[in-house]
Amino acid sequence: MARAFTPKVVTANDLLEGDVIYQTEDDRWSRELSEAELITDEAHAQVRLLDAARQANKIVGAYLADAVAGDNGPEPTHFREDFRRTGPSNYAHGKQESSPQPRA
Amino acid sequence: MYRYSEFDTAFLAERNAQFRAQVERRIDGSLTEDEFKPLRLMNGLYLQLHAYMLRVAIPYGTLSSAQMRQLALLAEKWDKGYGHFTTRQNIQYNWPKLNDVPDMLDALAEVGMHAIQTSGNTIRNVTADHFAGAAADEVADPRPYAELLRQWSTDHPEFQFMPRKFKIAITGSENDRAVIKAHDIGLQLIERDGVLGARVIVGGGLGRTPMIGKELSEFVAFDDLLAYLEATVSVWNQIGRRDNKYKARIKITVHEHGIDAIRAKVNERFLKVRPQFKGADMNLLEEIKGHFAPPAFREGSVASFESAYTNDPVFRSWVDTNIAPHKNADHAIVTISIKKHGQTPGDATAEQMRVMADLAEEFAYDELRISHEQNVILPHVHKSDLPAIHAKLKEHELATANIGLISDIIACPGMDYCALATARSIPVAQEIATRFEDLKLEHDIGHLKIKISGCINACGHHHVGHIGILGLDRAGVENYQITLGGDATETAAVGDRTGPGFAYDEIVPAVERIVEAYLDLRDSAEETFLETYRRVGMAPFKAVLYPEAQANAA
């Protein structure tokens, strides 16, 4: 029996900046996972992934990542996606960045 | 120090111009990512978890102060103010923008540096003993030969699309500080009857199938060495497996065919290749040797050093831990720890890089080295300058006296940066270092090497750590396996797994239990962790790591 489909978001890296981006329902790319389109249908997921792949001049390496519905939009189910939406744990860089310098 | 010839400079300028055009074509949509990816990897540009990453080669770990300052400039101008020194004597920038990378490469070219072949299935940056040219125990400086290998392997037409990557390390000493037995080819310089040559080790490597290298030849004279190495790589390039990337490295080829069969094939190929080498390589080697002439070591009293050593306990502790003997008795080799307790192993800020460059220029004959253990070395320092160097290092959080101790940890970037990682390694290293600093035990524990990798590819050399830690993803949770008894030196050994892994919040306490057990078990303060492990074996460590299993078995 096929495994039940678990909800997904389409995520990739921005071509120029290299940072993590998420596909939204209205076809934008957002820096915030919470703004991503949470896809609950497998066929729709494949279509959205194809939509992403067509934007090869803007993004790199689109794939479907597991996510769940949270109070403020999609949330990660795996720690790798949690790091991708936040940044590294040794400096406040990436999406958690508040200051441009690595060490206070 | 090697200075680029007109040929080197022109070659690099052309490569950089090519890559600039390739980046432009990617951005304007003429190249797809599938087309662009191999091109960017050839130039050291990866796409990691949060950003692009540029890996710059530091050939045989040697830098001038001007080069170090340029690395600082790159960190400041195009990154977030720091760089990460790696276990293969490279520096990685974690946050470049695609548009900026061509400018970064041009800036590197200004000081004779590049990122070519820091990725891809090519011969990678040739690494060397970080004490080369300075060590008291050395037959000869291995760096001229390493530079010859850099020139030979760069853009070598036969070796651009091999079954997998290929790593060469070289040392001039019997005491192996370059981990030659964990490389695809390891070279140990040997002098025989007045002729310089190398012992050739092949088929070492870590990763998913760790192997200790085997001796391919006990001695090949320099006259024949390049032809012999070309023959070796060539044999593997032909028969190495391309059907499965996990079985493609030469260690698997050697394992599957056997070292004797490989040796026979290499010897056969060598006879064909040898006539193509008509001595131009040896002429070039002679010329390169001129670039690496030792500095004119200055003379002078070492009284100020001795007085500081006697009177300043902090300085004395640093000297006892971070200084190694130099071939010139009035000189010393200084290892600058970039592993202050709680910091990321191998990271240096732009300011710290400039301070180290200034010290090299003022006191160390303008030379710096990067070690595979992710520290920075001033290879030639007159002992009377040590107090001034130490004082300056202290001002910039660079005077940590922990070389070879439990907080001098090798750690790969792990899942904080790396797209391949299965778990984090940096925070584990930070917490181990901080924990043992709090316990004030590290000098009592003595020589103990912890090495941490965040995935099975083993960039953090965990297999050859006295204590090795491997971070894995177990059912969606970080889990850490421990190995004991690994050894990265001339007595190289792969560590033994203790048993089931530990959760993220259990790994530091587990290491602490291992260390406590060692302190109880050692027969004197002189017996190192590795010696104790070899004497008593795994059982007592298993007992403290898995008390429940012991209780259940009883």
Image (cartoon, coloured by chain):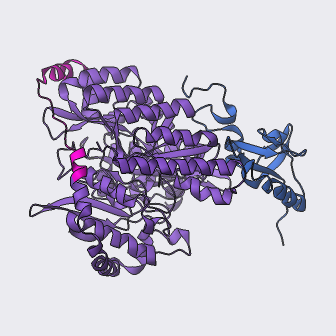
Chain colours: A blue, B purple
- Residue B157 place in picture, x, y as percent: 44, 66
Whether B193 is among the magenta residues is no
**B412 relative position to B196: left or right:** right
Number of residue marks: 0
Give how far across and how far down residue A2 sits, in percent. Answer: 83, 70
The residue under the point 12% across, 35% down is B329
Residue B18 shown left or right of residue A87 in the figure:
left
Q: Nearer the viewer, residue B168 or B519?
A: B168
| Span shown in magenta | B287-314
Q: Is residue B66 above or below residue B287?
A: above
Regarding residue B249, the answer to whether it shows in the image is yes
Residue in front for this viewpoint, B476 or B381: B381
Viewer-nearest residue: A73 or B220: B220
**Where on the picture, by quarter, is residue B490?**
bottom left
Residue drawn at x 46%, y 50% as measured from the top left: B460
Residue B270: % across, % down:
29, 76
From the viewer's side, name the closer residue of B493 and B23.
Answer: B23
* Residue B304 included in the magenta stretch of the image: yes
Which of the 4 quarters of the picture holds residue B526?
A: top left
**Could you tell me residue A80's position as x and y percent?**
67, 48
Q: Residue at x 39, y 51 (%)?
A: B465
The reply to whether residue B501 is visible in this rendering is no
Q: Is residue A93 above or below residue A12?
A: above
Quarter that holds the N terminus of chain B? top left
Q: Residue at x 80, y 49 (%)?
A: A67
